[in-house]
Amino acid sequence: MIYLQLFLAFLKIGAVAFGGGYAMIPLVEETVTQYGWLTSEELLNYIAISESTPGPIAVNIATFVGSSQGGLLGAFLATLGIILPAYFIILLISIFAKNILSKKPIQAVIGGIKPSVIGLIIAASITMFMSVVCNFSEFGDSFKFDFWALVIIAIIATISFTYYKLKKKPISSIYLIITAGILGIIFYGI
């Protein structure tokens, strides 16, 4: 039963989430907490690991969640579930792209989806910020401010901003992740 639940849950997420992996995070959080697969804090750890490993973040999250709930088969089915909708949508678009993308209704739909994607990414960012810096995952929780998390965020943001101003291009996220990991070891210990 868990295998079918994993597949269908991530199939649903993959089918309705537009805007890439970060836009999927609120849907993933709602799903995994609803099924009781992970707490919000555990999911946040999976998101951090997913961001640090190669590959699309949504696929990595699905793989980690599937693995935690159903081992290798669970990882495979959750991953398959999240990628199938995108695969078929891209396949259809590539077949009909010349005709379909120039149509006014399709342009209107895409125009409406763009702001919602930004809203989903902002919501995911606020949720992760509240969880990491304030240890706040749901209403009723008390705030426990994490000063070192805020310091790491500030250092990473400063490095990113400074690099962009000096080089006129963004710094590789790989360097920022490595730097954040080193700062975590320094501030939190091993």
Image (cartoon, rainbow, N blue to C red):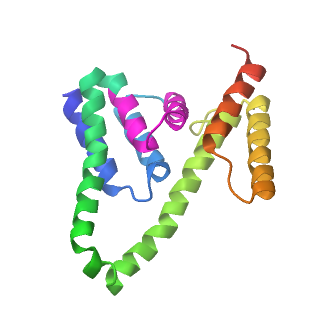
Residue 118 is situated, as x and y percent measured from the top left of the image, at: 54, 62
Q: Is residue 14 above or below residue 147?
A: below
**Relative depth, front residue between 96 and 120:** 96
**Residue furthest to the bottom:** 104
Q: Residue at x 59, y 55 (%)?
A: 122
Residue 63 colored in magenta in the image = yes
Residue 190 is situated, as x and y percent measured from the top left of the image, at: 68, 13
**Residue furthest to the front:** 167
Q: Residue at x 65, y 42 (%)?
A: 129
Magenta segment boundaries in residue numbering? 40-66
Residue 20 colored in magenta in the image = no
**Residue furthest to the top:** 190
Q: Where the N terminus falls, by quadrant?
A: top left
Q: Viewed as shown, does residue 61 lie left or right of 2?
A: right
Residue 68 is situated, as x and y percent measured from the top left of the image, at: 37, 23
Q: Viewed as shown, does residue 98 lie left or right of 114?
A: left
Q: How many marks?
A: 0
Predominant SS of the magenta segment: helix
Residue 13 seen in this snapshot: yes
Q: Residue at x 49, y 31 (%)?
A: 46
Residue 182 is situated, as x and y percent measured from the top left of the image, at: 71, 25
Q: Residue at x 55, y 48 (%)?
A: 124
Residue 135 seen in this snapshot: no
**Relative depth, front residue between 98 and 136:** 98
Q: Is residue 158 above or below residue 140?
A: below
